[in-house]
């Protein structure tokens, strides 16, 4: 809740003291991150001989334009999955042992849409705006590849958005941090990302950073989803 209050305060101060700016030229940004998160570590499974794996593919596209008062837009697809496979041993009536293959999968994939303004645009950059996350995933337990239990995650979460970036002049290097956060009713989501970026004069770049995603919301009337994912990511990007 303190993070949300801080974002609101920054938004009010910034809009009160700074004229909303637009880019002098049209800018297109696209990129891909591979995020090595730890979602599989939080999947409950009583099976033995466990094998854990994660998927963390992040794709984004952003458009910045010179039209005053019209927000810039960023779209991002987050393919986030964790999986635990293992076996259960069942003793039959005749004393023989049967191994039952099991698999538990949590899909926390979601799409982001962010509308933002650049309030600072030089070697120190500051973006302020609003985001919405649409979670379209599920949690499924498989027994011998047959689904034995499933809960769908279908939720829209509105968020406040802020990003700051510091450019080291004449080097192509920059450091940045972005935050999406809001506590609204029974839903509480915080998405924090920090990284180092290098961009060539051709507009090609690479990124190394760390991301933390905290989610806490109701899936239905009798089930609440609460989890925290974090880990390092690497990525490539292009700027036209």
Image (tube, grey):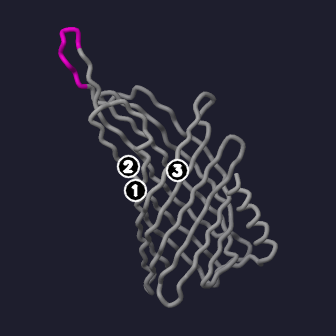
Name, please, the residue furthest toward the right: 16
Answer left or right for 10 relative to 207.
right
Query: Could you tell me how far apart the alpha carbons at marks 3 and 1 are, in whole angstroms?
Result: 16 Å
> Which mark sits nearer the N-terminus, 2 or 3?
2
Q: Residue at x 68, y 71 (%)?
A: 117
Q: Which residue is drawn at 76% across and 64% down?
A: 9
Are the two marked residues, 2 and 3, in contact with CB atoms closer than 8 angstroms? no
Q: Where is residue 172 in the image (x, y as percent from the top left)?
A: 47, 84
Q: Any mark on residue 184, and which?
A: none
Task: Determine which quarter of the picture holds residue 176.
Answer: bottom right
Query: Could you tell me how far apart the alpha carbons at marks 2 and 3 are, in whole angstroms?
Result: 15 Å
Would you place residue 236 above or below residue 217 in this image?
below
Closer to viewer: mark 2 or mark 3: 2
Query: Could you tell me how far apart the alpha carbons at marks 2 and 1 are, in whole angstroms?
Result: 7 Å
Answer left or right for 28 relative to 83.
right
Q: Mark 3 points at which residue?
A: 110
Q: Name the residue under label 2.
A: 54
Q: How crowded is mark 2: few (under 14 residues within 10 Å), some or many (20 or more)?
A: many
Q: Mark 1 points at which residue?
A: 36
Q: Does the magenta stretch include residue 137?
A: no
Q: Where is residue 70 in the image (x, y as percent from the top left)?
A: 71, 71
Numbered disc 1: secondary structure:
loop
Would you place residue 112 above or below residue 126 in this image?
above
Are the two marked residues, 2 and 1, in contact with CB atoms closer than 8 angstroms? yes
Point out the stretch of residues depicted in magenta. Answer: 92-99
> Which mark sits nearer the N-terminus, 2 or 1?
1
């Amino acid at each position: 809740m303190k993070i949300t209050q801080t974002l609101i305060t920054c938004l009010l101060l910034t809009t009160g003291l700074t004229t909303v700016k637009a880019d002098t030229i049209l800018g297109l940004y696209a990129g891909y991150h591979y995020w090595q998160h730890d979602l599989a570590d939080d999947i409950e499974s009583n099976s033995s001989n466990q094998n854990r794996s994660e998927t963390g593919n992040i794709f984004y596209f952003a458009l910045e334009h010179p039209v005053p008062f019209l927000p810039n837009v960023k779209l991002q697809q987050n393919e986030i999955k964790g999986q635990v496979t293992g076996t259960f041993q069942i003793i039959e009536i005749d004393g023989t042992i049967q191994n039952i293959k099991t698999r538990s999968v949590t899909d926390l994939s979601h799409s982001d849409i962010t509308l933002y303004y650049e309030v600072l645009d030089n070697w120190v950059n500051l973006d302020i705006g609003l985001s919405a996350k649409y979670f379209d995933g599920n949690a499924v337990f498989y027994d011998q590849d047959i689904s034995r239990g499933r809960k769908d995650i279908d939720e829209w979460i509105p968020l406040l958005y802020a990003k700051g970036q510091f450019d080291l002049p004449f080097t192509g290097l920059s450091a940045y941090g972005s935050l999406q956060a809001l506590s609204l009713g029974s839903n509480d989501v915080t998405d924090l990302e920090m990284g180092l970026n290098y961009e060539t004069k051709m507009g090609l770049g690479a990124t190394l950073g760390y991301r933390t995603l905290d989610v806490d919301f109701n899936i239905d009337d009798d089930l609440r989803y609460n989890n925290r994912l974090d880990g390092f990511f690497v990525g490539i990007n292009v700027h036209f």
